[in-house]
């Protein structure tokens, strides 16, 4: 299938490379297009959206995957595409857009009979190799047409699914990320206790490696934490400053609207706020985990 990827950052490039390996024809758009960088991965493209869209086989349906930051960048990109695409073309928003924004964008695109699929995309910088987990909302017929793309990207060819109407894909991904906040927080707190028990002189990388085998807390997050500790057992180059990208906040607000208590997720978000005014090994763990799975930048220790 033919597909254009808009936004060739770490995730967008990973998606492009995985699709080309699976035999799809991929066009790429980036404002700082570097032909030599992308052509070696069989990605043809442009720094001009008009040129990108015109590169499609004009007799084929156009499928465009948008992988840019949520909010205004996504909204402006979709607005530009609305003027360039035709009836029955499909836009896939693979970023972390707020689900209510995705519903609004879908309604606006429907004025030209253009379909929007909101694809919650998990897997971070490891997705290119390990595969992604894709939670997709929107028009079911459009989803069915794009299923070969999702299957090619998915972990084991199984990590994808249709969630429901517009907004549902990003809603499910939002809750997924809220859960992730709580899991990371409990991991950071437990490891910090082990770190502070100086009399035992515990080897944290040995312990996290041990827990990867048969333990009830084994997980991919634990694998990534083990990687970080093997690189630097004291995380000496990481500042205890933990950012948040918004999904935790949105999850908590949704819980309030639905009268669902979210003790762990709310506490984990407040801990991230606190990290920006404090210093602890646990916050270094949280910052390191975000860097390990998502390639998020970290503040370097002074």
Image (tube, rainbow, N blue to C red):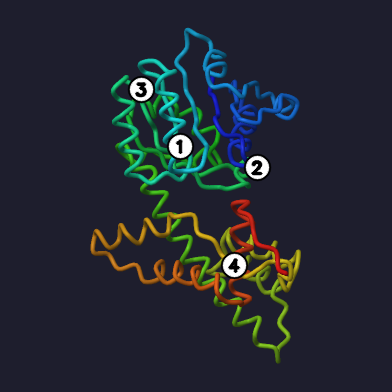
Q: CA distance from mark 2 to mark 4?
A: 29 Å
Tell me the element at label 4: loop
For marks 2 and 4 on the same chain, the one whose residue lies earlier in the sequence: 2
Answer above or below: position of 125 versus 258: above
State the residue position of label 3: 114
Answer above or below: position of 280 versus 81: below
For marks 2 and 3 on the same chain, the one whose residue lies earlier in the sequence: 3
Tell me the element at label 3: loop
Tell me the element at label 2: helix
Disc 2 vs disc 4: which is toward the camera? 4
Q: Nearer the viewer, residue 233 or 35?
A: 35
Q: Residue at x 42, y 18 (%)?
A: 85
Answer above or below: position of 287 versus 142: below
For marks 1 and 2 on the same chain, the one whose residue lies earlier in the sequence: 1
Q: Residue at x 63, y 65 (%)?
A: 212
Q: Position of residue 199 (x, y in %)?
A: 70, 92
State the residue position of label 2: 129
Q: CA distance from mark 2 to mark 3?
A: 32 Å
State the residue position of label 1: 74
Q: CA distance from mark 1 to mark 2?
A: 26 Å
For marks 4 and 3 on the same chain, the one whose residue lies earlier in the sequence: 3
Asked which quadrant contains residue 279, the reply is bottom right
State the residue position of label 4: 241
Q: Position of residue 236 (x, y in %)?
A: 73, 71
Q: Position of residue 137 (x, y in %)?
A: 36, 38
């Amino acid at each position: 299938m033919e597909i254009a990827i808009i936004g060739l950052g770490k995730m967008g490039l990973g998606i492009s490379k995985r699709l080309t390996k699976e035999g799809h024809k991929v066009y790429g758009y980036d404002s700082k297009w570097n032909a030599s960088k992308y052509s070696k991965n069989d990605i043809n493209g442009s720094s001009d959206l008009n040129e990108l869209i015109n590169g499609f086989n004009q007799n084929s349906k156009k499928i465009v995957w948008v992988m840019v930051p949520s909010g205004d960048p996504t909204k402006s990109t979709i607005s530009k595409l609305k003027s360039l695409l035709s009836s029955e073309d499909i836009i896939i928003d693979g970023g972390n857009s707020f689900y209510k924004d995705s519903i609004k964008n879908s309604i606006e695109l429907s004025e030209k009979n253009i379909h929007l699929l909101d694809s919650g995309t998990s897997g971070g910088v490891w997705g290119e190799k390990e595969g992604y987990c894709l939670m997709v909302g929107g028009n079911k017929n459009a989803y069915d047409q794009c299923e070969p793309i999702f299957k090619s990207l998915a972990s084991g060819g199984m990590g994808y699914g249709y969630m429901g109407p517009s907004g549902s894909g990003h809603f499910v991904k939002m809750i997924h990320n809220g859960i992730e906040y709580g899991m990371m927080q409990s991991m950071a707190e437990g490891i910090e206790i082990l770190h502070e028990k100086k009399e035992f002189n515990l080897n944290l990388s040995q312990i996290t490696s041990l827990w990867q085998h048969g333990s009830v807390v084994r997980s991919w997050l634990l694998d990534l934490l083990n990687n970080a500790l093997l690189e630097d057992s004291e995380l000496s180059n990481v500042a205890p400053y933990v950012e948040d990208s918004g999904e935790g906040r949105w999850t908590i607000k949704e819980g309030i609207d639905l009268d669902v208590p979210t003790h762990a997720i709310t506490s984990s978000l407040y801990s991230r706020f606190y990290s920006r005014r404090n210093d602890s090994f646990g916050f270094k763990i949280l910052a390191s985990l975000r860097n390990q799975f998502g390639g998020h930048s970290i503040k370097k220790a002074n």
